[in-house]
Image (cartoon, rainbow, N blue to C red):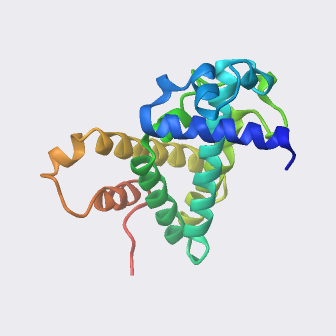
Amino acid sequence: MDAEGALRERLVDVGVELVLSEGTASVGLREIARRAGVSHGAPRRYFPTHRALLSAVARRGFEELGARSAAATAGADAPREKLGALAQVYVAYALERRGMFELMFRHDLLDSGHESAGPDGPRLREATLPMFEDVVELVARCRAEAVGPSAVVTASALWANLHGVAQLWSWGSLPLALGDPDDGPGRLIEAALDAHLGPVTA
């Protein structure tokens, strides 16, 4: 990687650190520059707008989540097992990297238009699609049906359910409702899978 590429990555690294430690509101071009030890104008060579910077940080989150998902499903064969592993990784990532998780799905804050397609890949809005398409395919396989509108709707409902579990758990609402269980949200994840796919039968 050349010096320009290294500096860009350093700026994104600092952005990730800020999101995780202080939240999305703390991530500004001037603060990134200060923490990276460069001039105030340096980040604008790579990120002309605040949205562009946030988008680069969010893209890093999708890369991390994708890598964790691939590792978690590498040893799984059955579609329900793979889907369960994906669900566990998704919720765990949300709880571990809360600021990043919240940013990744805030398309209202991110640069998701045609102009955001660049050297990093497709538009950020489209970064969610490969993950969702995997879930749709696994849902269809679990239900022994072709990929189609029914699988898409079920996958969407399951995703919304898991996202809600992640958010409500991180806010403390679900632990309170469940009496602060020691085993985390695992049972809720399984309940969500059962609700949308039916219980596992021997």
- Residue 39 is situated, as x and y percent measured from the top left of the image, at 71, 22
Task: Name the foreground residue: 99 vs 125.
Answer: 99
- Lateral position of residue 189 relative to residue 13, left or right: left
- Residue 25 is situated, as x and y percent measured from the top left of the image, at 48, 23
Residue found at x 23% / y 41% = 172
Compared to residue 54, the image places residue 167 above or below, namely below
- Residue with the most extreme bottom position: 202
Identify the image quadrant of residue 181. Answer: bottom left
Identify the image quadrant of residue 129. Answer: top right
Q: Quadrant of the C terminus?
A: bottom left
- Residue with the most extreme left position: 179
Whether residue 1 is visible here, answered yes or no, is yes
Task: Name the foreground residue: 64 vs 175.
Answer: 64
Compared to residue 19, the image places residue 82 above or below, namely below
Residue found at x 58% / y 32% = 35
Compared to residue 58, the image places residue 53 above or below, namely above
- Lateral position of residue 57 relative to residue 182, left or right: right
Whether residue 136 is visible here, answered yes or no, is no
- Residue 68 is situated, as x and y percent measured from the top left of the image, at 57, 61
How many numbered discs, if any?
0
Residue found at x 59% / y 35% = 15
Residue found at x 66% / y 38% = 12
Task: Name the foreground residue: 137 vs 66.
Answer: 66
